[in-house]
Amino acid sequence: MSFFKTQPKDLILLLCFAVVVLLAPILFAPIGAGYPDLLQKFAIFGIFALGFNILFGLTGYLSFGHAAFLGVGSYSAVWTFKLLSMNPLPAIIFATLVGGLFSALIGFISLRRTGIYFSILTLAFAQMSYNMAYSVLTPITNGETGLQLVQSDPRVLDVAFGRDYGAVLPSSDLFGIGMTGYPGYYFCGFMLILCFFLTLRIFRSPFGMMLRAVKSNQNRMNYTGLNTKPYALAAFVISGMYAGLAGGLLAVTDPLAGAERMQWTASGEVVLMTILGGSGTLLGPVIGAGAIKYFENIFSAFNDQILAQVYSFLPEILQQIMVAISSLFVGEGWHLTLGALFMIIVIFLPGGLMEGFKRLRNLISGKFGGGNGSGRATAPAE
Amino acid sequence: MSILSVRNVNKNFGGLKALDAVNLDVEAGTVHAIIGPNGAGKSTLLNCFVGRLEPDTGSVTFDGKSLLGIQPHEINQLGVSRVFQTPEIFGDLSLLENVMIPAFAKRDGAFKMNAWHEVAEENDIHALAMEMLADVALDGKAHDTAAQLSRGDKRRLELAMCLVQNPKLLLLDEPTAGMARADTNNTIDLMKTIAGRGVTMVVIEHDMHVVFSLADKISVLAQGTVIAEDLPENIKGDPRVQEAYLGGAQL
């Protein structure tokens, strides 16, 4: 099987990645991120960004509507819970498939255009989906309230296997293991490792090379006997399936699906994650997703009382001024911080955090006797 | 045997008659040059061979198959490769990848979802691409990024990308345009080597030095019609050609 033919260097990368994911509760504890709810978000949005990067990082098509596939994935998963079973496996399989189907439809139409027109088309489709989820599709989406589980759901598979949740509202469980807390994180983490492995294989494959060629020069591709359309569509559908899976996992850890997941701000967020981490790189999007979710968690928790404490060493009048200024950047206003952070990265590190790490490594290896030159000659996509 | 035959091709842009009843036959294994003053319709004619433009009337047949109404990538899959006036390469990718991509296109067709294979396992394609890079003396830069190359080296790379597909017909649109003299001479030498292997070529060129050192046969296009088609030595002395192309001056 070609599984075992993965290049040794990539196997080591995969292994390191898996170790970090598995030890995350310990590794991230010192920075205050070692608790399951946040770690679940890291893993889920890591998957979302990994998939988005296959489209944006490799082919260069900037989709502004990927949150639609995330939302569709969530709805599909919740419906699977309601109709079939509380087991997360059918839910995520169904979420991935529906994400793929939906993205095939939107991709087929949007990919008739390139550049800004493509971005606008995807944005329009996503906003359409968002508005429809709130209005005409209420029977499927339950509108503003969001799709929720109820005790009287049929759950035909659970019933067939004699699984009875009694008088309480059921929660998702994998053969008896509840999908909240650490088990929920490890379920998402396992999916993240799997997705990372798949992405790694795509990056190293002739197909991945063709996707990078789509970004580089479509005209040359056409005159080289390659049909660019199916390549771009395949990348779009793959990234849609990743988004569907991420949406499904959101529902697995918290069985609820709302339309706000499909809003354009959510689509913009995955763009930021990918660019912040380093688009077109393997690890960048996961790091970008983690960084944004981490800072969101920290900054949005601040409020005026906490700020007042922080500035308590200042005279009262200065303290009030500083609190007034700082409060713009925290809590609800944390997006202002995100915007500033994003601007700094794009201006000073166009290659994202991955470029920052690379410069740092070059700086260090330059200081310590130049390092060895061959060690730095890694594959261009890394 | 004629590998490419153009019959009675007409093309109008609005009121402008860009091509007027053009007939052309390219013999297999020869270098056929198309020359003519600016605006004579040379590039329009070439674009009709590769699916970029559709003639209003007439036929273009390659190897017994019509080239009209099919996409550029389908025409390439029939065995027609093209070199552009400004080299069209994959600037973000390495030279090696630039040459491997056409090799994959030749082997796997217009689309293949081989996402589970590793490029590193494709030893045959790798060896073939390295061989082609060595052919154009770029093997030492195989892992460099293509965008960094000089104009002349980009042209050599583009030729390697075409040659790796072992094309039946190679179309060259002003291959030495905008090149320094040394690069031009290198490119001519390379094209002579390619011609020596029996690759059929159609060359559009302004530079007479290039044309007369390469071509087996020359067609002269003026105002959308072929006014002469002959061996290079006869074209040199043809008064009609001198009138149309050189404005009466002696060559």
Image (tube, rainbow, N blue to C red):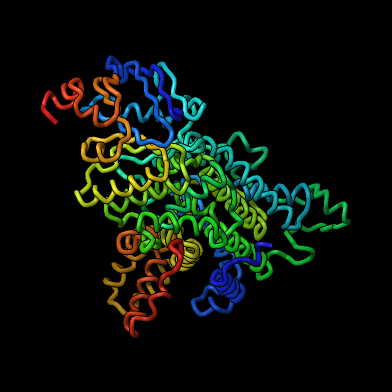
Which one is in front, B15 or A13?
B15
Residue A341 in view in this figure: no
Residue A234 in view in this figure: yes
- How many discs mark residues in the rendered view? 0
Place residue A306 in its image quadrant. bottom left
Which one is in front, A220 or A160?
A220
Q: Is A172 on the left-hand or right-hand side of A135? A: right
Q: Of all residues shown, which one is farthest toward the left?
A: B249
Kindly identify the residue that appears in the image at 44 percent across and 24 percent down. B60
Q: Is B97 on the left-hand or right-hand side of A253? A: left
Against B49, residue A335 (above or below) is below
Place residue B47 in its image quadrant. top left
Place residue A35 in its image quadrant. bottom right
Against B34, residue A313 (above or below) is below
Which one is in front, A123 or B55?
B55
Q: Of all residues shown, which one is farthest toward the bottom?
A: A368
x and y, in percent, of residue B228 in the image:
27, 22
Which one is in front, A123 or B223?
B223
Kindly identify the residue that appears in the image at 32 percent across and 27 percent down. B44
Quadrant of the snapshot with the N terminus of chain A: bottom right
x and y, in percent, of residue B240 in the image:
19, 20
x and y, in percent, of residue A132 in the image:
57, 37
Kindly identify the residue that appears in the image at 64 percent across and 42 percent down. A141
